Amino acid sequence: MAILDILEFPDPRLRTQAKPVSVVDDTIRKLASDMLETMYEAPGIGLAATQVNVHQRVIVVDVSEEQNDPHVFINPQIERLGDEILYPEGCLSVPGYYEEVSRHNHIRVTALNTQGESFTLEAKDLFAICIQHECDHLDGKLFVDYLSTLKRNRIRKKLEKAHREAG
């Protein structure tokens, strides 16, 4: 397993549309394993392959307090079932910023597991919100895209300045 580098906004690679995984093989299983390790180390509750500069439709999520309930979704597809709610979101690619975003509080997701088997599950509340957030990454979308242009530009400028100062 390996800790992967996480791209940070406004890196243009975060805007890349991820391609479907055609075959779930050892390369994809290693990617999922490395993504989980990276997410836990960060620490975070979700990570999309796009965030580690791999443009395939793979996300990992673990919203448990103990970080002992990992989920891998390959080629996830979401059906929105519940109401929209406002929930404060953060992102490993937008470190240090949290803003309220409107998401559905109940979804059904169909995906492949690391064995290439299809499964469907329903997710609610934080789990549902996290899956939607990570799936947005696969489409090149960030939570800051739900904010006003003013807020998004302010965050971009602060992160660009921090990157310059970090050298």
Image (spheres, rainbow, N blue to C red):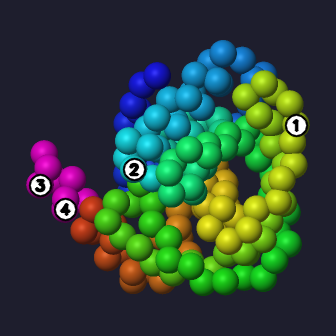
Give the mark nearer the N terminus: 4 vs 1.
1
Q: Position of residue 72 (x, y in %)?
A: 67, 40
Q: CA distance from mark 1 to mark 3?
A: 46 Å
Q: Which residue is mark 2?
A: 43
Q: CA distance from mark 4 to mark 1?
A: 44 Å
Circle 2 — which element? loop
Segment colored magenta: 160-167
Type of amino acid under label 3: Glu
Circle 4 — which element? helix
24 to 45, vertically: above or below: above
Q: Which residue is mark 3?
A: 165
Q: Of 94 and 17, which appears nearest the observer?
A: 94
Q: Position of residue 128 (x, y in %)?
A: 70, 64
* Mark 4 crowdedness (10 Å alpha carbons): few <14, some 14-19, many ≥20: few
Q: Position of residue 86 (x, y in %)?
A: 60, 84
Q: Position of residue 138 (x, y in %)?
A: 63, 49
Q: Residue at x 78, y 25 (%)?
A: 115
Type of amino acid under label 4: Lys
Q: Residue at x 66, y 62 (%)?
A: 127
* Mark 3 crowdedness (10 Å alpha carbons): few <14, some 14-19, many ≥20: few
Q: Quadrant of residue 9?
A: bottom left
Circle 3 — which element? helix
Q: CA distance from mark 2 to mark 4?
A: 23 Å
Q: Which residue is mark 4?
A: 161
Give the mark nearer the N terminus: 2 vs 1.
2
Q: Which residue is mark 1?
A: 118
72 sits to left or right of 98: right
